[in-house]
Amino acid sequence: MVEKLVAAHAAGELNFYGAHAHLTEARAFKAFLRLARRRKWFVYAKRLFAGPKAVLAYLSRYTHRIAISNRRLIKADITSVTFKV
């Protein structure tokens, strides 16, 4: 996954905002990744319980709550949603 992040950064496909805006610079991004590689990561993922429509319905309940507030939404179209973390 880290290799994909490095490739996306090099291609200019990543956007950083606010306190993370400095990660646009290659040196800062590499330093950030060094710290991230030192951590032990555990990914919990499970199969979709009722398909993509159910997942979208679940996520859409959070658009007006603190999890994904309107001010954090950057862009939404038919294929994707972009928001600030």
Image (spheres, grey):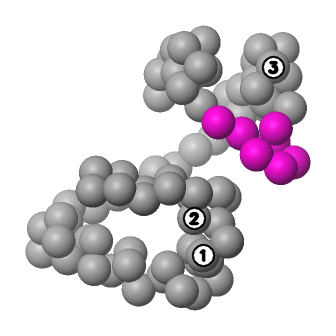
* Snapshot quadrant of residue 68: bottom right
14 is higher (above) or lower (below) than 74: above
Marks 1 and 2, how far apart in space?
5 Å
Q: Crowdedness of circle 3 by 10 Å Cα count: few (<14), some, many (20+)?
A: few
Please give left or right for residue 39 compared with residue 11 in the image.
right
CB under 8 Å between discs 3 and 1: no
Confirm or deny contact between disc 2 and disc 3 (CB under 8 A). Answer: no
Which amino acid type is marked by label 3? Glu
Report whether residue 84 is seen: yes
Query: Residue 81 in the image: x percent, y percent?
Result: 43, 57
Q: Is label 2 in a helix, a strand or a loop?
A: strand
Separation (CA) of disc 3 from disc 1: 28 Å
Q: Position of residue 48 (x, y in %)?
A: 19, 65
Is residue 23 in the magenta section?
no
Mark 1 residue type? Asn
Residue at image coords 84%, 14%: 27
- Residue 65 is situated, as x and y percent measured from the top left of the image, at 58, 87
Relative to 14, is 3 above or below?
above
Label 3 element class: loop
> Does the residue at mark 1 contact the one at mark 2 (Cβ under 8 Å)?
yes
Number of the front mark, 3 or 1: 1
- Compared to residue 23, the image places residue 61 above or below, namely below
Q: Residues within 10 Å of mark 2 (few under 14, many from 20)?
A: some
Residue located beneath label 3 in the image: 25
The quarter holding residue 16 reads top right
Q: Secondary structure at mark 1?
A: helix
Which numbered dot is residue 73?
2
At a point 83% along the width and 50% down the height, the residue shown is 18
